[in-house]
Structures are given as C-alpha cells and as structure tokens.
Image: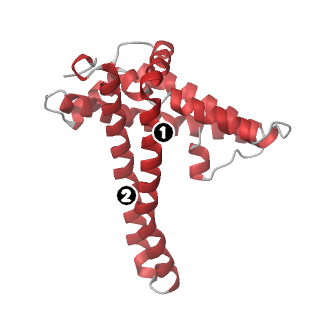
Amino acid sequence: VLLHRSLGIAPPPGAWGFLVYVVWYLGVYCVMNFFNCALAACVQTHLSGGQSTVSGGIRRAAARFGGILWWSLVSCTVGVLFRMIEDYVKWIPWLVPRVFGIGWTMTTYLMVPVLVLEDQDVAASLRRSAALLRETWGDQLLADIRFGWLTVLVALPSVVLGVVAMNYYSWLIPLVALYFVLALAAFSAVQDIFVVALYRSANGAGESAGVS
C-alpha cells in the first residue's frame, strides 16, 4: 500500500497520465511479487532440508505466474485506491486510511508464501493469509518494530556518508548509492526469509505445503 510513498511518485495529471501510472505501478508490483515468490520457494526448500537453487525458485514462481499476476493486480488496485482516498477525499480523517492500510498489510503479510507454496487461487490464498493472521499477529507486530529499528541502523551510515559526500567528497556519492541499494536488497531478503519462517511456524513446520 505504501510502495508509491517510498518511491516518492504521485499520479501524473490527466487520464492518460493516470493510466501510465497504473500500468507502471502494476509492473513494479508484478516484478517485486515474482522475485519475492521465487525467494520464498528457495527458503522453503532450504528449510525443508532440500537443495535450493535460484533457478528452482524462479521455476516455482513461474509456475504460479498467473496467480502472481492476479495478486499484483489486486494489491496494485488497493494501493492506488488508498492513495486516491488520502489525496482526494479530504473529508475522511487522515487516520482512517492509515488504519485500513495497516490492517491490509497485516492481513496480506503471509500472502507471498501462501501464494507460491500452496496450490490455491488468489482469493483462497488471501483468505488463507487472513486466517493465519490469528496465529501470527503478535509476531508480525514485534517483527515490524525490530525491522524498523534495523532499517534505521542500516540507513544511518548511508545518510551520514551521503551528507559528507555531498558537502566534501563528491566521488563518494556512487559508493553511498551502491551501499544503499545493496543494504536495501539484503534487508528485503531478510524480511522475506522471516515471512517464510513465520508461515512455516503458523502452518506447522512439518506440514508446510510447497516444494521440498
């Protein structure tokens, strides 16, 4: 829901501009969800005692591409609607969409492993993720707090080095950007691994569906 805010991109004016924005937004979601599902398949295979490979994870995600595409469309639509409500429906208190956004995020927290590891359509996967929320909501909240602090710790060096680079040593800027990209990728991977582990815990590690 908050992807557009993290990227700092707002819908351009006009019908065609908005259409381009939605298509771009859907593409970003589709790529992100595809590789998250590939990583989830690799993690599941490894935690189940198998030999995980990048190609194996990609094949597993490719086998579920239809579901990934539909889920990307659903999550993209929800994200755009939340953005439109926040930006254009001024009579709704700002807290209302934020609360619904948090609820949506928690409900879909386990959507990626459910989608790629269980042979269900998007609607059934969403219901399954929502059902698992009853088992995992406390762990989700604690994880969000811990990952929030971890984000600060990871981002702090890039902020400090960025200030130094812009004011004194401009040749450091590419290195700071590289550090930020690598740190963001590693942080995202750690989160995805945690989500799969949480899914296995809620589902019973020995009963988790999917590749082995």
Q: What residue is drawn where x is 45% and y is 55%?
A: 149
Amino acid type for the residue under numbered disc 2: Ala
Is 61 located above or below residue 187 in the figure?
above
Q: Nearer the viewer, residue 76 or 43?
A: 43
Residue 110 appears in the rendering: yes
Q: Earlier in the sequence, mark 2 or mark 1?
A: 1
Quadrant position of the N terminus in the picture: top right
User: Residue 192 appears at what percent x and percent y?
Assistant: 36, 39
Residue that lies at the very extreme toward the right in this rendered image: 91
Is 188 located above or below residue 58 in the figure?
below
Q: What residue is drawn where x is 37% and y is 58%?
A: 183
Tell me, yes or no, whether the two marked residues, 2 and 1, touch with CB atoms within 8 Å: no
Which element carries disc 2, helix, strand or loop?
helix
Left or right: residue 209 compared with residue 142: left
Quadrant position of the C terminus in the picture: top left
The residue wearing badge 2 is 183
- Give the numbered dot on residue 95: none
Left or right: residue 84 compared with residue 196: right
User: Residue 121 appears at what percent x and percent y?
Assistant: 45, 13
User: Residue 197 appears at what percent x and percent y?
Assistant: 30, 33
The residue wearing badge 1 is 141
Number of other residues with Cα within 10 Å of mark 1, as a class: few under 14, some 14 to 19, many 20 or more? few
Q: What residue is drawn where x is 30% and y is 26%?
A: 200
Q: Nearer the viewer, residue 151 or 71?
A: 151
Is 156 located above or below residue 73 in the figure?
below
Number of other residues with Cα within 10 Å of mark 2, as a class: few under 14, some 14 to 19, many 20 or more? some
How far apart, in angstroms, are the residues tagged by discs 2 and 1?
A: 22 Å
Amino acid type for the residue under numbered disc 1: Leu
User: Residue 184 appears at what percent x and percent y?
Assistant: 41, 54
- Where on the picture, by quarter, is residue 33? top left
Q: What residue is drawn where x is 37% and y is 34%?
A: 195
Which element carries disc 1, helix, strand or loop?
helix
